[in-house]
Amino acid sequence: MSITIENISKRFGGFTALDNVSLDIPEGKLTALLGPSGSGKTTLLRIIAGLESSDAGRILFGGDDVSDLHVRDRNIGFVFQHYALFKHLTVAENIAFGLESLPRKQRPPKTEIRERVNKLLEMIQLPDLANRYPTQLSGGQKQRVALARAMATKPRILLLDEPFGALDAKVRKDLRRWLRALHDEFHFTSIFVTHDQEEALELSDQVVVMSHGQVEQVNEPAALYARPESRFVFDFLGHVNVLEGNLKNQKLTQGDAWVSLPSVQGDQEAQLYMRPHEVQLARSPSAHARLPLRIESVSLIGSEVRIELQPEGWHSNELWEIGMSHNEFARHAPARGDLWYAVPDIGHLFTNAQSQPRTVDWHYPATATAHP
Amino acid sequence: MAAKHHRVGDQPWVRRILVGLALSITVILLVIPLVVIFYQALSAGWSTFTSNVLDEYTLHAIGLTLFVALLTVPLNLVFGTALAWSVTRFRFPGRKLLTTLIDIPFAVSPVVAGLLYLLLYGRNGWVGSWLGQYDIQLMFSWPGIVMVTVFVTSPFVARELIPLMQQQGSEEEEAGVVLGASGWRVFRKITLPNIKWALIYGVILTNARAMGEFGAVSVVSGNIRGQTNTLPLHVELLYQDYNIVGAFAAASLLAGIAILTLIAKAFVEWRQSRPEQPAPERGGV
Amino acid sequence: MSAPSQAAGAAPVRRFAGRSKRVLPGFGLSLGISLFFVSLVLLLPLTGLVMETAGMTWDQFWFTVTDPRVVESYKVTLWTALAASLFNGAFGLLLAWVLVRYDFPGKRLVDAVVDLPFALPTAVAGITLATLFATNGWYGQMLEKIGVEVAFTPLGIVVAMAFTSIPFVVRTVQPVLEELSPADEEAAVSLGASDLRVFRKVIFPSLWPAVVTGIALSFTRSLGEFGAIIFIAGNTPYVSEVTSLMIFVRLQEYDYAAASAIASLMLLVSLCLLFAIHLWQGRYLRRLEGR
């Protein structure tokens, strides 16, 4: 069942939570709503569920307008951020709740309910905890029970609000993998809200980045990371190194730093965004860039050495971060306080004239184009 | 005690003085008065006590008091629950005002409360005079007593429920609705178990006050012995008649109810403070 | 699946009507019951008082509420209520502190018996206190030796008011004291501050809003108290009559107008106190929740 969101707006008093949002959620895919707090992602999820009403716009499930349908009748599964398990019911009773709430005619007989609950308990790998109460469960167990409860009535759509927000790192990883496997097995249309970029990129088929009540970009995780379409998405997804300066004669200059930008016309303010892996470190400036940086710290832990650098003779709001393989690190042995030069391979140029960046590739200049 | 204390007032001498002071004032102001009631009631012997309690007028007063409480408690239970549900589960203009308004009976003197009802429903009041045409008299009879008692005790249930329901939030109920449960099912299966103890607590307090209200009831009752005399009014009547032992015999019944209230309250608080129980007795729920 | 094609490409669809459906059930029912009840039980009776008072001329009203005997009752009521609530401020703070901070035998009993004044009917409290403090009573005899008379004096009113409002301060301060973080206190103590200083500078600043709330509640209750007072006060005109008794006296004289005039004044004061306390709590609670 696909979901279509058309021109949804929502205000709370003077605060605009959602501003004319339109979106397509493909059938059978796992979609992440990613954004900082206050970006409207949870509100959007609650509107899709029917837990909140929108001021304008409509929601369609598989082409049917459900905007005026009560939550009860939308046949969705919803997993709440803090699980919202019924404290006074056992795990089994929690899971059976939806089935027992069905109208008498559709309600399966008691034995069938029990069977279905047992199956769900096996699915969430907690068959022994049927008679426990929620307070006797760990966070991860509660999350699984909440999921089983939501899936018991076989909803067409599964919505999850910050599903792993309250869990510690280790449990979070396990549950993520488990949810992905579960999704691949059942293929319901799911949407989950998260503020964790890693979680969104790792888990989903499609990521919707939101900020200030608007959709910034929708894409598959890999494409999203490789080709952000706005400054916001760049900043929000992983680290980015920025050179902010004056563009003149195909050269971006600020203080002692400059980068030549062949084939870029114009005379204006501009920012060049570069991911840590799109920049290399060298002992001397290259023909196309001079970006002097002093090493501030070196972090050896991980598959790559991470080096933080402070601009020398120019300015950047945040420290630069550049990765280096352990091999290379052993060869050059950069140390704190050394002066190095950044050499960009690929950069993304933002000017005030265009909202979308223009990608510059110094090794294969022919491919340097604006995004489609 | 080599270790230095680290919280204020943990030194033994401070602690001893403060506990001693608190205990003595508690004994003087609270415990001894409670003892005196029973001491006075029994001062003329057990047989005088029983004959005082089994006195015709006392028995009638007990009956009327129970009757008033029996009508008042369910009314305020429904009202308090409805009010708590509406102000904690929905946002609407005037919500804050409503939660302030229900505290009026706590702020108003019971005599003023009685007067308000007397002025409206009494023979000269605009509702009272209209009812008078149909020979319906509410004041100076039991309906008036019930009405002012409902007024005086109306905040108790709501006051217990509102903070609890606010703190619990409505996520569980939302989850119930998402799972397709009807309104009644959500209330009975999800809300009610969560507020059960606070509800009982509210009922206990409502009942205690309903049985013990004096000022408001005394304005609207007319104090007719054997007709509109509740137990607290009967206590006053006997006391004014210089039947001190009789007054305390009646008072001891009310004090007994007060003690039961305190015990019930302590029990409910103890239940509430316990972490969620893996109740072994799960038959009829 | 029935041809939503024309809608799909359409311009923003705006439908405001019928949008505010509530997710949780029972809004109409619960609000309906509440409003009906509040109107019928709490607000409608006010109209009787307004009409009765409106029937008086201003001069009549003024004459009634400034009658010297009545004015004397205001004074007595105010100062006794103030004295009683201040006593409860101190005693309540002490009790709350002892109950939260220390363990001692009988603690649960003390905690339970604190609520006795709310559970015990005021008339019972009244005759009990009157008996205890009478010159031949247990307390009266002892106090007589040091020349203090309580029964049938304004002091008796203070005792009755104090008794009936003991729980307010204890029960407002207790939860705040329980949630006080030990860390602030430990930090202050570790910096070498004396206990008294830590209490003044660290503990009391977080406690006093609750103490004030408790005192205000206790004061409001004391202003209106009737049952417990009339037995012990002696009710001597110009000396030990409280205002609620004045209303009662006027009623027994069948002077409904005078009773209403005094009652309307008293009601106004109580309602102002009520709203002030709610505003105060609203502000103070918001600060607690950090909103």
Image (cartoon, coloured by chain):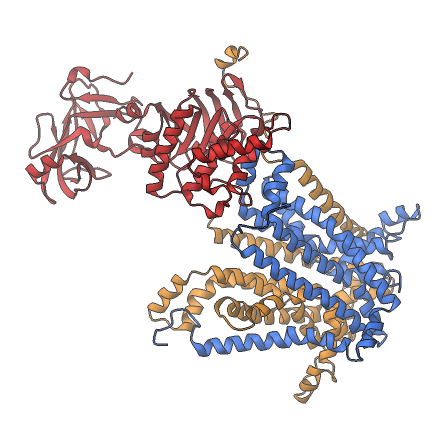
Judge left or right: residue A86 versus residue B147: left
Q: Considering only vertical position in the picture, is A292 above or below C149?
A: above
User: Residue A235 in the image: x percent, y percent?
Assistant: 29, 33
- The quadrant in which residue C224 appears is bottom right
Q: Which chain is orange?
A: C
- What residue appears at the point 48 percent right and 54 percent down from the top-left corner? C288
- What residue appears at the point 34 percent right and 76 percent down from the top-left corner? B2
Q: Quadrant of the C terminus of chain A?
A: top left
Q: Considering only vertical position in the picture, is B258 above or below C13?
A: below
* Depth order, front residue of C110/C22: C110
User: Residue A184 in the image: x percent, y percent?
Assistant: 38, 25
Q: Considering only vertical position in the picture, is C1 above or below B221?
A: above
Q: Considering only vertical position in the picture, is B225 above or below A21?
A: below
- What residue appears at the point 30 percent right and 25 percent down from the top-left corner? A224
User: Residue B78 in the image: x percent, y percent?
Assistant: 70, 46
* Depth order, front residue of C132/A266: C132
Judge left or right: residue B226 versus residue C227: right
Residue A227 seen in this snapshot? yes
Count of numbered labels shown in the rendering: 0
- The quadrant in which residue B219 appears is bottom right
Q: Which chain is blue?
A: B
Residue C56 seen in this snapshot? no
* Depth order, front residue of C11/C108: C108
Q: Which chain is red?
A: A
User: Residue A343 in the image: x percent, y percent?
Assistant: 13, 30
- What residue appears at the point 54 percent right and 19 percent down from the top-left corner? A65
